[in-house]
Amino acid sequence: MISNALSLMILLPLLGAIVSFFVGTKAKFVALIASLAPLVLSLQMYMEFDKSSTMMQFVESYNWVPSIGVKYTLGVDGIGFPLVLLSTIVTVLVIIYSWGETKKPNQYFALLLLNEVGVLGVFTALDFFLFYIFWEIVLIPMFFLIGSWGGRKGLCSNQVLHLHPRGQPGDAPGDIRSVFHLPAAGGSKPLIC
């Protein structure tokens, strides 16, 4: 298995999103290649995944911001890995389904890849701070995808999706304050029980 496979699975769509944004109408080809790479990695991981184990697998851990106890820690278990595999399959299928997109295709495919980055990060993050960052990364492309390509009610749907889950409209600063109070509570906590 490739070492750091989870990081690579997240990095490749990110690089693909950046390239897609700048290549114009060729973005769909870049997006397809950038989404097939994580799919191949996840299929390889599926072959090596120990289904009888209850432990985290393919774990990567690095000190990220040691002053506040934040680590860059990724891993998957029996619940998270099927979601990772499903996400990589669905992303490829969405790109193929959207092949004929003509309205700003470079932005559309870049946002799809950025969404994959966030989703894969959410399902693999084992540190609360890192999870929060990936969660917010998911919201950004979803906001633009729904608003620009979501049909007649795209803007209304955006308000429901992005304002109400926080409890109060515009409470993102409250979320950020709670994350930055982590050092007072002894640092970021691992998401493993």
Image: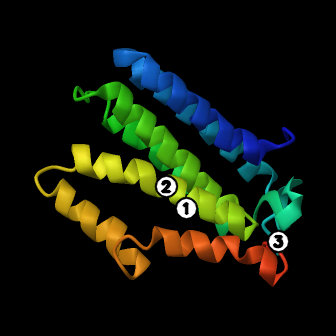
Which three-letter amino acid code belongs to the residue tagged 3?
Answer: Ser
The one of 193 and 173 positioned closer to us in this rendering: 173
Name the foreground residue: 132 vs 14: 132
19 relative to 1, above or below: above
Contact check, label 1 and label 2, Cβ < 8 Å: yes
Q: Which sits in the foreground, 106 or 84?
A: 106
Q: Residue at x 74, y 76 (%)?
A: 182
Whether residue 145 sits left or right of residue 21 in the image: it is left
Quadrant in which the C terminus appears: bottom right
**Numbered tag placed on residue 72 in the rendering:** none
**What residue type is disc 2 on?**
Val
Q: Which mark is residue 52?
A: 3
Could you tell me residue 30's position as x and y percent?
49, 22
| SS for callout 3 | loop
Q: Taking 182 as reference, is 12 above or below it?
A: above
Could you give the CA–CA distance between mark 3 and mark 2, rounded to whole angstroms? 31 Å
Write down the residue under mark 2. Answer: 138
The residue at which mark 1 appears reads as 135
**Residue 63 falls in which quadrant of the image?**
bottom right
Neighbour tally class for label 2: few under 14, some 14-19, many 20 plus, Cα within 10 Å: many
Cα separation, mark 1 vs mark 3, equals: 29 Å
Residue 82 location, x and y as percent? 62, 62
Whether residue 82 appears in this view of the structure is no
